[in-house]
Amino acid sequence: MADTAVALARAWHFARANSLLMVSGAVIALIWANLSPEGYERFTHSLHFAVNDVAMAFFFGLAMKEIIEATAPGGALHSFRRGGLPVIAAIGGMAGPALLYVGMAAATGRPDLARGWAIPCATDIAFSYMVARIVFPANSPAIPFLLLLAIADDALGLILLAAFYPSAPVRPLPFILLLGAACALAWMLRRRGTKSFWPYILAPGSLSWVGFYLGGLHPALALVPILPFLPHAARDLGLFVEPAERMGDALSRFASWWKTPVEIILFFFSLTNAGVPVTSAGTATWMVLGALVAGKPLGILIATWAAERVGFHRAEGLAWSAMLVLGVTAGIGFTVALFFTTASFEPGPTLDQAKLGALLSVSAGVLAIAAGKVMKV
């Protein structure tokens, strides 16, 4: 029994470290949607709101936790001197795909597709990190650079989602009033020395969710403005350090408690959103895929080159060949790209086409591995 328990624990750790739950959800969704589209549609319709609008708030909460810690004293993005180049590269890695996508929409005479310009801006941290560990040596400066870029990408992506993709007609007054009340309540909890993360999530978090929902903004962002109020370590201990290794502050306990549930949430997110007919490929598919695979590395390289012209410097050993492979790796959109597709388009053929492009962006990982071998990074 002990050996079985150890084997299961190792299998679970491997599955979690390599995002296999999310991948398996996507595979099941694709098979189900193509074998029984009506059954799949009924299933996803019943879960869509609970998964996309409620549960995914905790996924974005964990992303926000990394942003908070990376920008804390000692964090990799705390000073512009330390984090400036990855942030500039992230901006280029979002602008490049967006401009390429909009250009393709104009060139193909499909202005109706232009609304999806933010879809290829996304970088999937989990998949990109997994590929980077395969491509680069363990001590390569390309790996932390990619992580910093992806964190900055997430932060900018949250802003894009809130600003440009409301889930309903925007109503500023209820949003401002309820979010203001939620932040004030979170501030009061912190001032009283509340050390558990649960009161912050259950009271201000719920109030924030209602504010986002009634205000017409995507409620999955509800925890983003609340998490900065949670007591957290005075200094950052490193990128993606396991929460158990950190101090016992509320933010670390939040991450530790929700890490496994979020893996399950991502399984259901993939299961609910990734099911598209394989015959649905169309213009939007190739636009999303092309913008991610080509626009990401192009934007990152141009932005990095421009940043160096004004005084920024790459880390020692981070050659241009490694930057190219890193840029291709960042072209894996998957999770966040899928989320942006559902925010960009109504259910129908265009949404299916765009989803397929986001799913096919995992091919950027294969390209990165091949390019890494050829360029010997």
Image: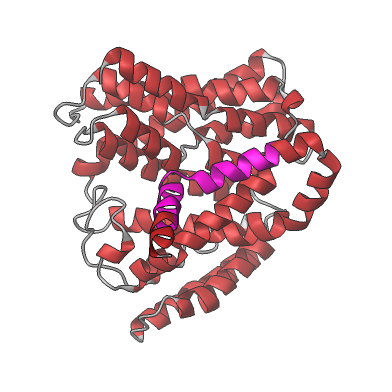
Q: Is residue 116 above or below residue 71?
A: above
Instruction: Please tell me which residue is depicted at 64% across the width and 66% down the height of the picture.
Output: 173
Bounds of the magenta span?
8-30
**Which residue occupies the foreground of this view, 107 or 321?**
321
In percent of width and height, residue 99 lies at 52, 24
Q: Position of residue 359 (x, y in %)?
A: 59, 32
Front residue (pair 310, 262): 262
Q: Position of residue 148 (x, y in %)?
A: 31, 42
Seen at 67% across and 55% down, the residue is 170
Q: Residue furthest bottom?
A: 192
Which of the 4 quarters of the picture holds residue 104?
top right
Screen quadrant of the N terminus: bottom left
Predominant SS of the magenta segment: helix
- How did the renderer colour the structure? secondary structure
**Residue closer to the observer: 63 or 225:** 63
Magenta highlight on residue 9: yes
Res. 324 in view:
yes
Of the 4 image quadrants, the one containing the C terminus is top left
Give the quadrant of residue 218. Answer: bottom right
Q: How many marks?
A: 0
**153 up-or-down from 236: above or below:** above
Judge whether residue 201 is colored magenta.
Answer: no
- Is residue 341 in view? no
**Residue 348: x, y in percent?**
79, 36
Looking at the image, the residue that sits furthest to the right is: 38
In the displayed structure, 75 sits above or below 286; it is: below
Residue at x-position 51% and y-position 58%: 262
Q: Is 111 drawn above or below residue 22 in the view shown?
A: above
Q: Residue at x 31, y 58 (%)?
A: 242
Relative side of 31 to 337, left or right:
right
